[in-house]
Image (cartoon, rainbow, N blue to C red):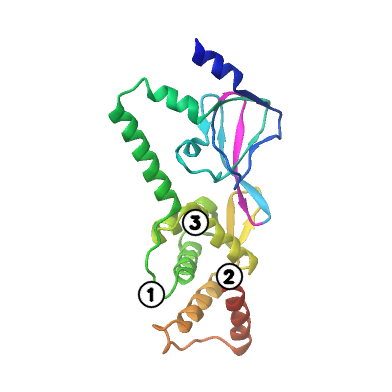
Amino acid sequence: MGDKVLVRKLIEKYEDGDYICREGDVGHDMYIIKSGKVEVLKEMGDTEMRIATLGPKDFFGEMALFGANRRMAAVRAITYTEAIVVTKRMLETQYKKVPDWLVSMIKTIAKRIITTSKGVKGHFKIGLDFTILKSLYLLGNVVGTPTSRGAVLPIDVARDEIMYTTGISYDEVDTWIKRFNLVNFVSIKSGTGMLEIPDTERINFYADFIHSKSREGKNVKLSIDSDTTKSFERIYKLMQR
């Protein structure tokens, strides 16, 4: 009876358009959707991109209960929504009802998920930026759909491939995509879930330019003109900040 009263007191209500949490916020609770619908959003460039839609019985924010206090995405109601707030106190109460070995296993799995989500960087002889650029070059040519403005592919496909290739986290992939968006190597198509690569050859040339800056590439000869070299020098300095 006590648990039911506690849950009833922790139901929060949101109108269409209300943010339940924002990306980067500090949070300590998990939410279970009782009724309504929400969208999960990631910041991409100067916009927010929907990566999931959740409805009744779905939940989000669960990693906050195990130490990942920064919200990895924003969540916004898209209809009138009621959500049950699950606190660490409530979780600890539930732990008393299950064997200690199961509690230990749950906590261990959660910690491993948090560690994995932070990413495990590999050792790249040339540089992480070189590896990501080469991945984008191949994705644009192999997976992308040709258009009059370059190649277009789903951003989640690009993200998953880069994560698999480099071992970095979901959030760090997004950070790199934002940086490349600033120098027009890619373009984030607001509201479409698509990533546009205007010029795959330019990306490839810049990757080779980065290679020439490394110890391993000191003998690399670039087949680019002086104007392009100057442009790449400016981009290189900007990206080092």
- Disc 3: which residue: 158
Mark 2 surroundings: few (<14), some (14-19) or many (≥20) residues within 10 A? some
Q: Identify the amino acid type marked 3.
A: Ala
Q: Position of residue 232 (x, y in %)?
A: 59, 80
Q: Main secondary structure of the magenta part?
A: strand
In the figure, 26 relative to 96: above or below? below
**Of callouts 1 and 3, which one flags the residue occurring earlier in the amino acid sequence?**
1
Tell whether label 2 touches label 1 (CB within 8 Å): no
Task: Find residue 125 and name its label.
Answer: 1
Give the extent of the magenta segment: 32-45
Q: Nearer the viewer, residue 30 or 196?
A: 30
230 on left or right of 215? right
Q: Quadrant of residue 94?
A: top left
Task: Say which of marks 1 and 3 sits in front.
Answer: 1
Q: Position of residue 91 (x, y in %)?
A: 45, 27
| Residue 152 seen anywhere in this rendered image of the structure | no
Task: Find residue 45 and name its label.
Answer: none
100 on left or right of 194? left
- Disc 2: which residue: 199
Q: Identify the amino acid type marked 1.
A: Lys
Residue drawn 48% across the image and 25% down it? 90
